[in-house]
Image: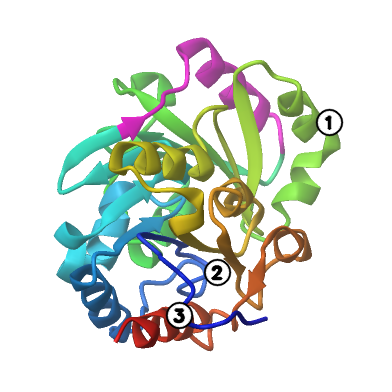
Amino acid sequence: MGMSQKTRNIKLICSDIDGTLVPDGTSEINKEVFDVILALKEKGIIFAAASGRQYESIRNLFERIANDIIIISENGNLVMCRGEVMARTEILKEDVQDIKKRIDAIENCQLLLSGVKTTYIRRADRELYRLMKEGYHYDITLVDDFDEVDDTIIKMSLFQKDGRAEEVAGEEFMDYWSVHPRISAVCAGKEWIDLFDKDGNKGNAVEQIQKIMGIKVSETMVFGDNLNDIEMLHRAEYSYAVGNAREEVQREANYIADTNVNDGVLKELKKLLAELD
């Protein structure tokens, strides 16, 4: 889908990372993305990288331009700009225990805790540790038991290595959180279900940035591929699903970009940049 040229007044661009900018669980990003983001910045357009990943993982991925962008990490639960916190949420201790108990009751699943300081994985979960360390380049603290953790928890994630997270977790698990007063549970990829405070999603993070910087929905462009991107798409007039996005996400988006492996986001950013020249 296209649009007429010379009609957009974009001031903010937000893009999901895994499945949108890069293949899931990799650190391979087309370096031309950095050049285009910097060129857009010179035109007065802010770029925000949005992901379920931890802050350090995103910062490492965008290391060359990390101080030139806003980083929306942990599914919108921590928003950082040049090392300073713009917004954050947290999970109450009683809810941390409830989530832990319910995930531990599900076979063939592992649990990851995201704190403000770092990410926590049980020492026994070596496969999950290797994925997060080698694939996502996370900063990780290994613990024997999560009760050892002394940190503010902002997100908890169920990991299912076979890519059947929703199926294995089951309807009862998802239904429980759908009516919970404080916690949301959302699919963040085939292997992942993320749980966090109901105020902590990418859409609310984008809204906070818009409020702080005086940017309108009509001046915002967003890219995503998965269910945890839908709230973010609703905060932008120029909302794009990449071609490999889930059908539910494509239905919610106003436009469709090329797939992630075909640099769909980069192509749209270059089109925008060409309009501005």
Q: Nearer the viewer, mark 3 or mark 2?
A: 3
* Residue 212 location (% of width, % of height): 30, 37
Query: Residue 139: within the magenta?
Result: no
Q: CA distance from mark 3 to mark 1?
A: 49 Å
- Distance of mark 2 from mark 1, alpha carbons? 27 Å
- Disc assigned to residue 6: 3
**Crowding at label 3, few (<14), some or many (≥20) Cα neighbours within 10 Å?**
few
Q: Secondary structure at mark 2?
A: loop
**In x, y percent, where is residue 247?**
77, 65
The circle on residue 19 is: 2
Give 274 or 113, whichever is nearer the viewer: 274
The majority secondary structure of the magenta stretch comes to: helix
Residue designated by label 1: 172
Range of magenta residues = 87-106
Which picture quadrant has residue 146? top left
Instruction: Tell me if mark 2 has few (under 14), some (14-19) or many (20+) residues whose alpha carbon lies within 10 angstroms of its own.
Output: many
Circle 1 SS class: helix
Q: Tag 1: residue type?
A: Glu
Instruction: Tell whether 248 sits left or right of 21.
Output: right
**Quarter location, residue 161:** bottom right
N-term-proximal mark, 2 vs 1: 2
| Quadrant housing the C terminus | bottom left
**Residue at 71% from the left image edge and 36% from the top image edge:** 106
Kind of residue at disc 2: Gly
Q: Which SS class for mark 3?
A: loop
Q: Residue at x 68, y 46 (%)?
A: 108
Q: Which mark is residue 117?
A: none
Q: Tell me which corner region of the image, top left, top right, bottom left or bottom right, holds residue 207.
A: top left
Considering the image in quadrants, where does the N terminus appear? bottom right
